[in-house]
Image (tube, helix red, strand yellow):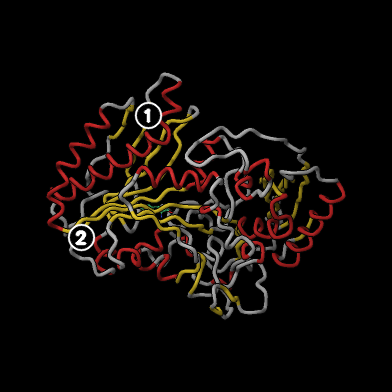
């Protein structure tokens, strides 16, 4: 993956405040990586996962009840070392998720966790074998109804010491029998192969039992979450397993559910890389892990149309949800949107990068980077929009992309759609926001309005 190693060539991320960051009793000196804007700092400690009638907290609790014997952890402090988030888990040095355009850095050594897997090693180190760890995670991203720079993940895992592995065939037989009684169609043509192998240090019989336990456990969770609703339509629930790649598992899978006429990706999972357990001082154990995004699941289960709603403090939102239950969200009002377009020329000799790379994921989506050239990254643009407009911006969409035939200069036009979730916005208010975005992108990204 071609990826510039010098951050100096990139468009600067959101201008950091001059003061070192002081978070959770620690001071983090600033450097060229620092890119944590005040809007993100204001999202720390909102505690959505522990609010008893918040849909994310209710969903978390339902998953915990399903894995009744797992230890439940809600991890409070999102600051992790870059080593914990990436290196310890085997992410290569040039992984796109590491870019300052994709993750939030306090400085070159510390960041806000981009996934809950960042806590795997420390949690295994504590000696726990079966746990669910939920937390807020942070990624710089595009702006639309399903992307928000803070979201919530749950990491789940079950590992066994060598002697305990002998119990797995019986456990698997019981899980398989339970699943056989459910109206569930599992589409799984995945195979162990050179592209998705067992680990050399594992006895293949053990690895096969662990993989089976992983599959049964997650199929059963998915049926618990989605089965009730699907059954009411009379059709069995369809779940699909796909081969995947994660640096910290093999074999690895992604799991999807057939929902609303399309395949919805739910989670990533696999057999824990032995190196992870070795680092945690647990070499004698092996097992599986998964990571899922709570918002993505909650949005479809509760029918919540916009990810910003999870941050609403409006009683009309929060009063709708009851612990232990998944109910359909009833929109209380939809205020009119107001869109404004912004056309600009990129600085000369700029290469554009679209948003959409995934920290922690397979890592596609970063394209067209040429060494020695300045980079316009959509995530930097969106970050400035969020800083100015906060939750008043609903979507930012590229509607035109043009290269002048003679000068070869590139221009872009973005449509910024503004809409508040709890009041009407005046045209003047929106104009003032658009004006402020314009001023900041001109001064911070070196672009020129058309
Ligand atoms: N951390 C991954 C992500 O954010 C998800 C994941 C994949 C977690 C596989 C896991 C796993 O524990 O085994 O995309």
Viewer-proximal residue among 348 and 311: 311
**Secondary structure type for disc 1:** strand
Given residues 175 and 425, the one toward you in this image is: 175
Residue 381: percent from left, percent from top: 66, 58
Q: Is the residue 267 above or below the residue 446 in the image?
A: above
Is residue 83 in view from this perspective? yes
Q: Provide the residue designation for mark 1.
A: 238
Tell me the quarter of the image containing the C terminus: bottom right
Task: Look at the image and tell me in which quarter the N terminus lies.
Answer: bottom left
Task: Note whether residue 3 is visible.
Answer: no
For image coordinates 57% across by 73% down, the residue present is 23
Q: Secondary structure at mark 2?
A: strand
Q: Is residue 297 above or below residue 384?
A: above
The one of 101 and 318 positioned closer to us in this rendering: 318
Q: Position of residue 304 (x, y in %)?
A: 59, 38
| Spatial separation of the CA atoms under disc 1 and disc 2 | 33 Å
Q: Is the residue at mark 2 in contact range of ligand 1, meaning its CB lies under 8 Å from it?
A: no
Mark 1 touching mark 2, by CB under 8 A?
no
Q: On the image, numbered disc 2 is attached to which residue?
A: 285
Residue 91 vertical placement versus 31 (above, below) = above
């Amino acid at each position: 993956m071609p990826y510039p190693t010098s951050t100096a060539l990139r468009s600067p991320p959101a201008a950091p405040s001059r003061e070192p960051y002081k978070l959770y009793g620690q001071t983090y000196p600033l450097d060229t990586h620092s890119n944590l804007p005040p809007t993100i700092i204001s999202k720390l400690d909102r505690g959505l996962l522990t609010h008893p009638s918040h849909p994310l907290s209710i969903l978390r609790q339902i998953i915990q009840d399903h894995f009744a014997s797992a230890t439940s952890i809600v991890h409070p402090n999102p600051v992790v070392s870059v080593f914990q988030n990436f290196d310890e888990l085997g992410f290569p040095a040039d992984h796109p998720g590491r870019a300052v355009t994709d993750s939030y850095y306090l400085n070159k050594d510390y960041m806000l966790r981009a996934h809950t897997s960042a806590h795997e090693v420390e949690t295994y180190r504590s000696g726990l074998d079966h746990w669910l760890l939920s937390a807020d995670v942070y990624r710089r991203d595009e702006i639309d109804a399903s992307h928000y720079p803070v979201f919530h993940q749950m990491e789940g895992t079950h590992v066994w010491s060598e002697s305990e592995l002998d119990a797995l065939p019986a456990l698997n037989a019981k899980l398989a029998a339970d699943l056989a009684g459910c109206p569930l169609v599992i589409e799984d043509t995945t195979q162990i192969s050179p592209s998705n192998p067992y680990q050399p240090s594992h006895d293949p019989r053990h690895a096969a039992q662990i993989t089976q336990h992983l599959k049964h456990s997650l199929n059963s969770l998915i049926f618990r979450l989605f089965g009730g609703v699907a059954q009411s339509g009379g059709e069995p629930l369809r779940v699909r397993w796909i081969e995947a790649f994660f640096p910290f598992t093999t074999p690895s899978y992604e799991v999807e559910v057939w929902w609303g006429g399309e395949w919805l990706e739910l989670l990533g999972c696999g057999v824990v890389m032995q190196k992870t357990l070795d680092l945690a001082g647990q070499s004698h154990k092996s097992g599986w892990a998964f990571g899922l995004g709570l918002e993505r699941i909650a949005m479809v289960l509760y029918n919540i149309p916009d990810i910003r709603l999870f941050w609403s403090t409006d009683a009309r939102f929060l009063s709708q949800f009851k612990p232990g239950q998944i109910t359909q969200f009833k929109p209380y009002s939809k205020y009119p949107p107001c869109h404004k377009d912004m056309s600009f020329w990129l600085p000369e000799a700029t290469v554009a990068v679209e948003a959409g790379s995934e920290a922690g994921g397979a890592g596609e989506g970063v394209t067209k980077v040429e060494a020695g050239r300045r980079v316009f990254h959509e995530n930097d643009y969106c970050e400035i929009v969020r800083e100015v407009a906060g939750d008043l911006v609903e979507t930012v969409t590229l509607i035109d992309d043009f290269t002048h035939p003679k000068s070869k200069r590139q221009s872009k036009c973005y449509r910024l759609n503004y809409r508040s979730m709890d009041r009407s916005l005046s045209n003047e208010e929106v104009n003032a926001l658009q004006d402020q975005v314009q001023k900041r992108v001109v001064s911070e990204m070196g672009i020129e309005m058309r």
